[in-house]
Amino acid sequence: MHFRQPWVMGMQQEVERLKERFHEQEKLLRECEAIKGEVRMLLMRVAELEKRNLPVSN
């Protein structure tokens, strides 16, 4: 079998395209996880600031 056949080259190109998409999605997933961590930290900070600014009732 010759590896220069059109269908073999087409499959190799498709595999490369899918690998590239996989790496892009992997990068986006890491970025989303980092953003989730930042949002959690900001929510905790907001809660802390809101707690400090509660009016004191006598």
Image: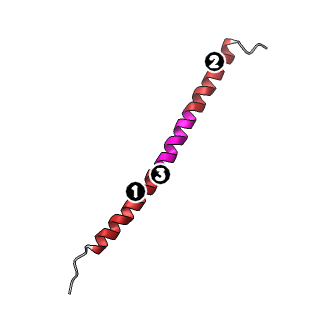
Label 1 Cα crowd, 10 Å radius (few <14 / some 14-19 / many 20+)? few
The magenta stretch spans residue 18: no
Q: What residue does disc 1 label?
A: 39
Instruction: Give the Cα distance between marks 1 and 2.
Output: 43 Å
| Residue 39: % across, % down | 40, 56
- The answer to which image quadrant residue 4 occupies is top right
Image position of 45 (left or right of 25)? left
Q: Which is nearer the N-term, disc 3 or disc 1?
A: 3
Q: What residue does disc 2 label?
A: 10
Q: Which residues are magenta?
A: 21-33
Q: Residue at x 63, y 18 (%)?
A: 10
Image position of 42 (left or right of 15)? left
Q: Name the quadrant of the C terminus.
A: bottom left
Q: Residue at x 52, y 39 (%)?
A: 25
Q: What residue does disc 3 label?
A: 34
Image position of 28 (left or right of 19)? left
Spot the residue most to the right. 1
SS category of the residue bearing label 1: helix
| Residue 35: % across, % down | 43, 51
Q: Amino acid at mark 3?
A: Ala
Q: Amino acid at mark 1?
A: Val
- The answer to which image quadrant residue 3 occupies is top right
Instruction: Give the Cα distance between marks 2 and 3.
Output: 36 Å
SS category of the residue bearing label 2: helix
Q: Which mark is residue 5?
A: none
Q: Which is nearer the N-term, disc 1 or disc 2?
A: 2
Q: Residue at x 37, y 60 (%)?
A: 42
Q: Name the main secondary structure of what is drawn in magenta.
A: helix
